[in-house]
Image (spheres, rainbow, N blue to C red):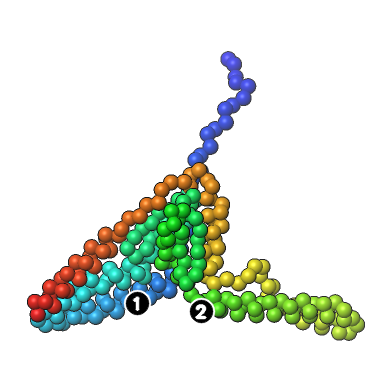
């Protein structure tokens, strides 16, 4: 009985695909939940306790308002994968392979510019001028504290004798200054997306065509509610 000189290597398990990075606006979600709660409370109360046409008007208003509130607050999201960027806006879903993205711009709004020249806004990553100003103030304050810490450390190194220990321990409890500039949350996310674009744009699997799909699951109920509300108001 012969034995093989070597054993064939066991097949390697397939590498699972990496999960998409998901970006959403926490402020938008919180505001949407609050608005939906208020609308539901008022609407249900009107339906249960209202008289005459009031319950029907309240029902039509809810059918019209709830999809719109959810579309502009809970629905927006950005999914960044290895091969493409998927943007879920209030009424559209845009899928852009990284190879079809020309640039990512940040101004008064964050947007993606495709190679065709078309622009798509990122509703899930809003621009906050207040957050930018707050980040700029933190960056300036961090720079001032870093300069003070360096000066104190130098002074402690020069001081000797009885005061050497005091000089060296003056900043012993100070939090280390983190590397890199302080950035607003939206700007930081855009920086991450630009890094992904630079890394994955030339990849063969990141090529393809841009697709745009309208969110009929949002527009349909909203239009239905608007039509019912208009009929009820017109009938009187």
Of residues 55 and 236, the one nearer the viewer is 236
- Residue 84 shows in the view: no
Q: How many angstroms separate mark 2 from mark 1 (CA)?
A: 22 Å
Q: Which residue bears the numbered disc 1?
A: 34
The N terminus is located in which quarter?
A: top right
Q: Say few, some or many: other residues with alpha carbon within 10 Å of mark 1 (under 14 / 14 to 19 / 20 or more).
A: few
Towards the viewer: 234 or 167: 234
* Point 50% across, 77% down: residue: 129
Residue occupying image coordinates x 50% and y 64%: 105
- Residue occupied by mark 2: 130
Quadrant location, the C terminus = bottom left
Image spot of residue 67 (x, y percent): 28, 68
Under circle 1, the secondary element is helix
Q: Which element type, helix, strand or loop, lies under badge 2?
A: helix
Q: Position of residue 81 (x, y in %)?
A: 47, 53
145 or 202, which lies in front? Answer: 202
Left or right position of 168 against 193: right
In the foreground, 37 or 61: 61
Task: Kindly report which numbered mark, 2 or 1, lies closer to the viewer in this rendering.
Answer: 2
Report the residue that reaches farthest toward the right.
161
Q: Is residue 9 visible?
A: yes
Residue 94 point in image, percent of width and height: 38, 56
User: Which badge, 2 or 1, is on the more N-terminal residue?
Assistant: 1
């Amino acid at each position: 009985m012969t034995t093989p000189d070597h054993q064939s290597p066991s097949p390697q398990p397939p590498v699972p695909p990496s999960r998409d990075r998901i970006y959403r606006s926490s402020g938008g979600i919180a505001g949407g939940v609050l608005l939906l709660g208020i609308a539901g409370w008022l609407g249900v109360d009107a339906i249960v306790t209202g008289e005459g046409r009031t319950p029907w008007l309240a029902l039509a208003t809810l059918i019209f308002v709830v999809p719109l509130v959810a579309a502009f607050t809970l629905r927006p999201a950005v999914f960044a994968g290895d091969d493409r960027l998927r943007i879920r806006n209030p009424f559209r879903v845009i899928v852009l392979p990284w190879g079809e993205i020309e640039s990512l711009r940040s101004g008064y709004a964050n947007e993606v510019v495709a190679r065709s020249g078309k622009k798509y806004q990122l509703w899930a990553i809003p621009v906050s001028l207040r957050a930018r100003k707050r980040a700029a103030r933190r960056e300036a304050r961090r720079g001032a504290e870093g300069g003070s810490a360096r000066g104190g450390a130098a002074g402690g190194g020069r001081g000797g004798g009885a005061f050497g220990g005091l000089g060296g321990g003056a900043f012993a409890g100070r939090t280390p200054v983190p590397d890199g500039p302080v950035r607003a949350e939206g700007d930081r996310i855009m920086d991450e997306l630009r890094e992904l674009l630079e890394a994955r744009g030339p990849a063969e699997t990141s090529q393809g065509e841009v697709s745009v799909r309208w969110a009929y699951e949002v527009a349909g109920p909203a239009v239905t509610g608007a039509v019912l509300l208009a009929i009820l108001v017109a009938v009187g």
